[in-house]
Amino acid sequence: MIKNFTISIPFIVTQSIKNNNKIMKATYVSVWDGDTTISTSCEFNPETNDVTDIESVDVEGLDILFEQYVELPNGDVIKNFTIEGDEIEPEE
């Protein structure tokens, strides 16, 4: 008779590790008042287009966010992405 036993599910652990490996360092770029560009570090998941861990910067004195995008290490620019679940789309 078996009283206590443990079942391990390696597939779930493997999937979790696999998804974490897809997160890459990137640059979050915001353009304010049409001509002030601020670039900060962030992490980007290309599978979900989710941006996290955006470095905080003081934007005091800047009024209007004109544009924002993510630049990947290979130079690609991503303009459709999410930040903490909020979808960001470029204005046309």
Image (cartoon, rainbow, N blue to C red):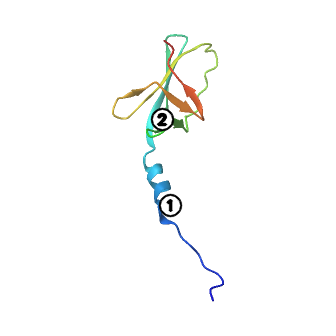
Q: Residue furthest bottom?
A: 1
Could you tell me how far apart the alpha carbons at marks 2 and 1 are, in whole angstroms? 22 Å
Local crowd at mark 2 within 10 Å, few (<14), some, or many (≥20)? some
> Considering the numbered disc 2 on the image, is that residue within a helix, a strand or a loop?
loop
| Residue identifier under label 1 | 13
Q: Residue furthest right?
A: 3
Position of residue 85 in the picture relative to residue 36 (left or right): right
Answer yes or no: do the residues labelled 2 and 1 have beta carbons within 8 Å?
no
Residue 92, how many percent across, how many down? 48, 12
Q: Which residue lies furthest to the front in this view?
A: 1
Q: What is the quadrant of residue 2 in the picture? A: bottom right
Q: For this rendering, which residue is in front, 16 or 38?
A: 16
Local crowd at mark 1 within 10 Å, few (<14), some, or many (≥20)? few
Rendered-image quadrant of the N terminus: bottom right
Residue 17, how many percent across, how many down? 47, 56
Q: What is the quadrant of residue 6 in the picture? A: bottom right
Q: Which residue is drawn at the image coordinates 60% and 79% (left, top)?
A: 5
Residue 15, how many percent across, how many down? 47, 55
> Considering the numbered disc 1 on the image, is that residue within a helix, a strand or a loop?
helix
Q: Which residue lies furthest to the left in this view?
A: 74
Residue 10, how many percent across, how many down? 48, 65
- The type of residue carrying mark 2 is Asn
Q: For this rendering, which residue is in front, 92 or 36?
A: 92
Q: For this rendering, which residue is in front, 90 or 30?
A: 90
| Residue identifier under label 2 | 49
- The type of residue carrying mark 1 is Val
Position of residue 91 in the picture relative to residue 4 (left or right): left
Q: Which residue is drawn at the image coordinates 48% and 35% (left, top)?
A: 49
Q: For this rendering, which residue is in front, 67 or 36?
A: 67
Q: In this view, does 5 lie above or below 33?
A: below
Of the residues under marks 2 and 1, which one precedes in the sequence? 1
Q: Which residue is drawn at the image coordinates 52% and 35% (left, top)?
A: 51
